[in-house]
Amino acid sequence: MKYPSFKDLILFEDDNHIVVNKPPFVASLDERGGSGEVNILRLAKQYSADAQVCHRLDKETSGAIIIAKNPEAYRSVSMQFEKRKVQKTYHAVVDGLFTFKELFIDLPILNDGNRSVTIDRKEGKRAETIFNSIKFYRHYTLVECKPITGRMHQIRIHLATQRAAICGDTLYKGKPVFLSSIKKGYRIAKDDEELPIMKRFALHAKHVIFKGLDGEDIEIDAPYPKDFATLIKLLDKFDC
């Protein structure tokens, strides 16, 4: 896999923080077992020696991720996450039509340690997400997701509980989007295998707001990566 230049990922930088637009299929931190693959933390440390990643995104998820350039900034951002002060907004494409208006989901999540999670009202940890529908297509919905807590797979499983699985999220029964399913008359050669428009689940960390060390808000918007932008473009063209 060809890895991008770290500089090309930077959306914002000051003396204390960097915000990058994480590409899909690049891990946030070193993964268990030490695969040796390039990740955001390693790239950041090559750029700024004391860099620390302040939170993580799933490997397939793209979008805004905050990096601290020194211990003071790391403590500050970590404390903001702990107190639920960081405002995060994700965009997801889900299979089906759903009218979410400030839908508040507060189903507790239990991490079983096997790269998946379950809803568990007795032993699960508090998990809260707010959902709003942004755009409706014939077969799909673009959804704004605002996690208040930060549990593993929180947005993914909370949407799945509403029967609104994220497209391509096979772990939670989400189905990939194929061009043949939205474009009338689209055919592929008999012996060819059609590939999905996106080769991952359709989730992107679009927007983040946190406070710098001076107390002023830092607000960053992360543009869609190529694959997510292509999916939206094709839905706009063929599924409206």
Image (tube, rainbow, N blue to C red):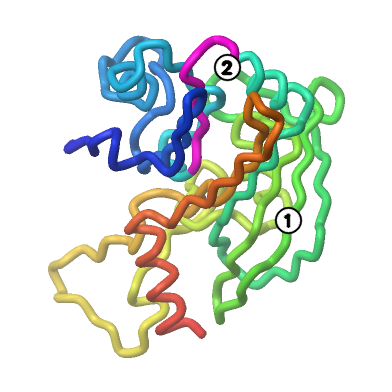
> Residue 152's image quarter?
top right
| Mark drawn on residue 228 | none
| Residue 74 numbered tag | 2
Q: Nearer the viewer, mark 2 or mark 1?
A: 2
Residue type pointed to by label 1: Phe
Residue depicted at x 16% and y 74%:
190
Residue sticking out furthest to the bottom = 185
Q: On the image, numbered disc 1 is attached to which residue?
A: 131
- The residue shown at (80%, 65%) is 101
**In the visual, does 33 lie left or right of 105?**
left
Q: What residue is drawn where x is 26% and y is 22%? A: 37
Q: Quadrant of residue 135?
A: bottom right
Nearer to me, 3 or 153: 3
Residue 149 lies left or right of residue 31; in this view the side is right
In reply to whether residue 89 is colored magenta, the answer given is no
Q: Position of residue 221 (x, y in %)?
A: 53, 51
Q: Is residue 46 above or below residue 158?
A: above
| 198 sits left or right of 89 in the view | left
Q: Secondary structure at mark 2?
A: helix
Q: Local crowd at mark 2 within 10 Å, few (<14), some, or many (≥20)?
A: many
Q: Nearer the viewer, residue 62 or 112?
A: 62
Magenta-highlighted residues: 64-72
Q: Position of residue 30 (x, y in %)?
A: 39, 16
Q: Earlier in the sequence, mark 2 or mark 1?
A: 2
The alpha-carbon separation of the residues under discs 2 and 1 comes to 29 Å
Q: Is residue 54 above or below residue 13?
A: above
Q: Is residue 13 above or below residue 104?
A: above
